[in-house]
Image: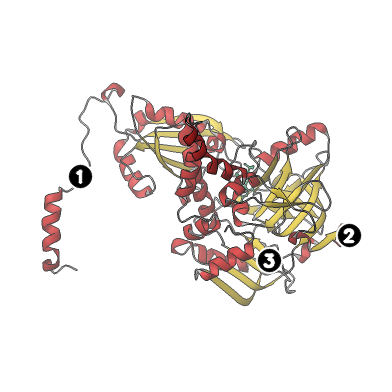
Amino acid sequence: MALDNLRQFIAAIDAGGDLARVEHTVSVDKEITEIADRCMKSPGGGPALLFTRPTLPGGAPSQLPVAVNLFGSEKRMALALGVACLDDIGARIAELLNLKVPDSLLGKLAMLPRLAEVAKFPPKSVSGRPPCQTMVHKGGEVDLSRLPVPICWPEDGGPYITLGGVITRDPRTGIRNVGMYRVQVLGKDTLAMHWQRHKVGASHWREMAQRAETMPVAIALGGDPASVYAASAPLPPTIDEYLFAGFLRGEPVRLAKAVTSDLEVPAEAEVVIEGFVDPREELVLEGPFGDHTGFYSLADYYPKVHVTAITMREDPLWPHTIVGRPPMEDYYLGHATERIFLPLLKLTLPEIVDLHMPAEGIFHNLVLVSIDKQYPGHAYKVMNGLWGQGLMSLAKVIVVLDKDVNVRDPKEAWWVALNHIDPERDVRFTMGPIDVLDHSSRGFTFGSKMGIDATRKWKEEGFAREWPNKIVMDEATKKRVDAMWKELGID
Ligand SMILES: Cc1cc2nc3c(=O)[nH]c(=O)nc-3n(C[C@H](O)[C@H](O)[C@H](O)COP(=O)(O)O)c2cc1C
């Protein structure tokens, strides 16, 4: 059975002995960050945290507990998505993409269960009052300052909603998008929406601006854990995140109509903030914000959201994450994406054996990729191919290695890469779009990229010398030493 909401997820984490309940009063003003940061830096990601008595910036007690680091370990990420190992999901996707129509009747019959599975994915609309609308505050009753929205870091521009799924709709196709974008609280009923220019929410907003139409927006806090994760996944704009979450869960996501717009929101959310952006209105200053690069992202201008309603379930809790110097909880969300999307990348680049984005590279700064090299220049074909795929286009450095290198171990990858390269020959620079959070590029979101061909060089690539073997002890010697090890008196 899939987990339907965050309380079920937290109960499952607790049952696994992975939840720390903090009963002490803790302020949402930076104290939660300091505690969560210390936990997230511990090996394996630290426990999930449930702050049962958080206090608001003025010192008043919060009505809502705050949950942090729910997704911050490989084990909890797999639990959120209902699998033992994240690679299992990639395998399921690969199998689905292999759906060939069989010629025999028996083969066709054998396909039926898989097709029935596909029918389970689309979200379902519920009728009646959904759990997330047990309490409804509309119009003048809206007051964001009553929510425990944390102030994360000392130089932050204000309190930030960090684990919300921002729901918008493409005015051309009607397809929904859900993106995990940070949202700054500006006042009682106003927010600043930090959807970066490369993201789908921002493209919906540009389209609405061209049409000079008001754009409904909803921000879902909580819901089933697969949906929370799906908002962070780099899906193509044509795929609804709740459809993808239904695939991950093996059960549809239940949606309900918002109370002040015609968007649909997750019925099982803890809190939903509904509102609109008027693209004709002036942008507002958003930030600075202590970001997942480990540096502050500078203040910039983003759209203002006018909040029209806040709806909640009974006894809601506030899901939150912090970002900052890696590793943080978002490494595990990104790691799930890396594992789940690998088979999709392999569809267009089948020579890829494995790929890894280490925590210190914060996803877009460093991609280590191993390939089954088949011809001269193959490494360049792969790096160019990666730079041509969706958000991979933002990758700053791509290192290509041979298939025998374990790229999931960055120490091994760098050891081999640094041995294998003649920098002037094997490093290439190119230009392209750069992540909004990059503070070093020559222009905002535009700059250079570096590709490193760290594969063994071939004669046809102009390498005339002999390439040496990696040092590995022979099996016979290892066995002899194994047999005498205990008698050596070393352990
Ligand atoms: C914790 C967290 C915070 C994020 N904050 C932002 C943000 O403020 N703005 C943004 O554009 N992307 C942010 N992202 C990345 C997006 O969620 C990610 O790129 C996602 O694929 C965007 O969805 P979209 O492709 O539907 O636009 C964040 C990711 C995580 C895990």
Q: Is residue 100 above or below residue 341?
A: above
Q: Is any part of residue 396 visible from this angle?
A: no
Instruction: Check disc 1: other Cα within 10 Å, few if <14, some if 14-19, many if 20+.
Output: few
**Quadrant position of the N terminus in the picture:** bottom right
Amino acid type assigned to the residue bearing label 1 in the image: Ile
Mark with earlier residue (3, 1):
3
Mark with earlier residue (3, 2):
2
Amino acid type assigned to the residue bearing label 3 in the image: Leu
Q: Is residue 440 above or below residue 160?
A: above
**Marks 3 & 2, CB-CB < 8 Å contact:** no
Question: Which residue lies under the disc numbered 1?
Answer: 471
104 relative position to 166: left or right? left
Is the CB of the residue bearing disc 1 within 8 angstroms of ligand 1? Answer: no
- Residue 388 x, y percent position in the rendering: 53, 30
- Residue 373 x, y percent position in the rendering: 34, 31
Q: Quadrant of residue 315?
A: bottom right
Q: Is residue 402 above or below residue 485?
A: above
The dot on residue 317 is: 3
Instruction: Check disc 2: other Cα within 10 Å, few if <14, some if 14-19, many if 20+.
Output: few
482 relative position to 4: left or right? left
User: Which residue sits furthest right?
Assistant: 140
- The residue sitting at 76% across, 55% down in the picture is 273
Kind of element beneath mark 2: helix
Q: Is any part of residue 285 visible from this angle?
A: yes
Label 3, label 2: how far apart the Cα atoms are:
23 Å
Q: Nearer the viewer, residue 84 or 458?
A: 84
Label 3, label 1: how far apart the Cα atoms are:
55 Å
- Residue 414 x, y percent position in the rendering: 35, 44
Q: Nearer the viewer, residue 406 or 399?
A: 406
Question: Which residue lies under the disc numbered 2?
Answer: 140
